[in-house]
Amino acid sequence: QVQLVESGGGLVQAGGSLRLSCAASGSISRINAMGWYRQAPGKQRELVAEITSGGSTNYADSVKGRFTISRDNAKNTVTLQMGRLKPEDTAVHYCYVNYGIWYRHLWGQGTQVTVSS
């Protein structure tokens, strides 16, 4: 059974920084991609950033230049370093992992990020 454990998040003032981490454990033969989505109240879940096993990254336009995603393949972890945070970044942030030959998808439980103005 594959599990995701998220850490980080919290409350920060606008312009500040936060770091989110996510670790995948369990029966994982290979990880294809890991990343973060977020969902604000009343809005759809949206991609924040993702990184493939080969190191290719993809960012939402709204976070480019402010957020950096990185991955430790040996530890099956992904980290999202968030900088110059804005109130509109406030949302529940969800880690995900896409793994195995069948490209299965698993979500984390979510962690709240709140940016005050």
Image: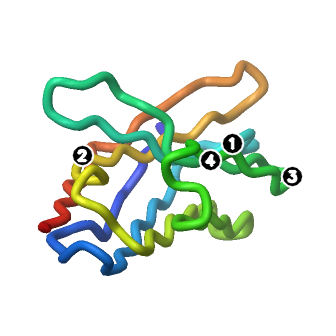
Q: How crowded is mark 4: few (under 14 residues within 10 Å), some or many (20 or more)?
A: some
Cα separation, mark 2 vs mark 4, equals 17 Å
The amino acid type found where label 2 is placed reads Val
The Cα atoms of the two marked residues, 2 and 1, are separated by 20 Å
Q: Position of residue 82 (x, y in %)?
A: 44, 69
What's the residue type where badge 4 is placed? Tyr
- Mark toward the viewer: 2 or 4: 4
Q: Which mark is residue 33?
A: 1
Q: Where is residue 77 in the image (x, y as percent from the top left)?
A: 57, 63
Mark 2 lies on a secondary structure that is strand
Tell me which numbered mark, 2 or 4, is placed earlier along the sequence. 4
Residue at 52% x, 67% y is 66
In three-dimensional space, the C-alpha distance between marks 3 and 2, rounded to whole angstroms, equals 27 Å
Residue marked by disc 2: 92
Q: Which residue lies furthest to the right in this view?
A: 54
Front label number (3 vs 4): 4
- Kind of residue at badge 1: Ala
Which of 114 and 73 lies nearest the eye of the viewer?
A: 114
First in sequence, mark 1 or 3: give its number: 1
Which one is in front, 72 or 63?
63
In the displayed structure image, the side of residue 86 where residue 35 appears, left or right: right
